Amino acid sequence: MVWGGATFDAIARLKREQSSLASKRSSIRPHELGAGPKKEPFDCMFLCDVCGYLSDTDPPCPSCGRQAWIDLDYWGLAEALRAREEEERRHPPDRLRWQLRLAGAAIGVGCAAGFALAGVAALGWPSLLSLGGGATALTHRFGRRRIGRGLMLRGGGRPTRWHMPLPLVAEDAVVAARVVGQPQPRGALLTAPFSGRPCLGYELGVLFDAPGDAWPPIWVLREMRSCAFDVHDRHVEADAVTLALPITPVAQPAMIESARQRFLRQRGLFLVDGRFDLFEAILEPGAVYELQWASAPQGAPPVIHATSGVLPRGAYR
């Protein structure tokens, strides 16, 4: 069986894009900026300036092997990163611009066709073209952000920051082993940060919309955590499973605003910069799941699925 599904496509895409992402980043060099004495009173994470991997410590990056960490504890470094990302958001990639244009054109053509079928535009092709062009222009002018958000929710971009088990599954891997059962925790359960629910593991996603940017809303975080658990005779260590579960919006976060502010700041994000929409997937205690182990590379973490047979869709999948 060939390793497939929307989540595995996303993993493969993440792996392919690491090199291209590295060539686009303009490195923030701590020794040139000077970290300075201003530092958060709480611990923040390290962000790899090459591939966007988030880490609690600063060894060679487990994703790309480089040691180009931005220590987000320091305000000087966090502010430099913030300014750079704000400038990058002013220049969306051509691929995304064309997706927005084509979506707007499709809506415009659909409106013109609807008018024609309703008998509103009975004056011939000139009227239809005018209506279509006007509808396209209005759609792009007033609906661009809504269209862009829809594209992102259907998988139109990868997060700028991410933390998930490594190594990533090889693109040509097959399923080498699988087991179905109820994961049994080997210790205390985790608490999902956004919803506050007890769980064996969670995946977080954060969609960010900055007012006035040329970009539509973008994914700025993908993060997976899990506790150690057993499924039958299989042992899975903490933070060593990839979740392939549906990720859904958290409409009413359990986090108060100050907790959200701190959580985002620990990852180099600032609540005052715009709108942050929170998404979450939960590995629920007592539920039955299927674990799959890939054939390559050696040591790749297992991927856990719901047993309903429904592939995860939406978000950045």
Image (cartoon, rainbow, N blue to C red):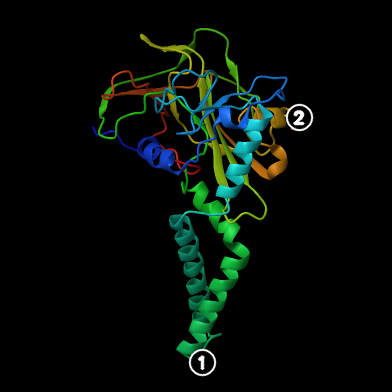
Q: Quadrant of residue 144?
A: bottom right
Say above or below: 20 vs 96. Answer: above
Task: Please state the horizontal and vertical placement of residue 252, each as a whole percent of the image.
Answer: 69, 36
Say above or below: 30 vs 118. Answer: above
Task: Please state the horizontal and vertical placement of residue 248, each as a whole percent of the image.
Answer: 56, 38
Q: Amino acid at mark 2?
A: Ser
Say above or below: 151 vs 246. Answer: below
The residue under the point 35% across, 39% down is: 16
Q: Which residue is mark 1?
A: 123
Q: Amino acid at mark 1?
A: Leu
The residue under the point 43% across, 18% down is: 240
Q: Nearer the viewer, residue 36 or 150?
A: 36
As drawn, which residue projects farthest toward the front? 32
Say above or below: 243 vs 18. Answer: above
Q: Which residue is mark 2?
A: 258
The residue under the point 57% across, 14% down is: 189
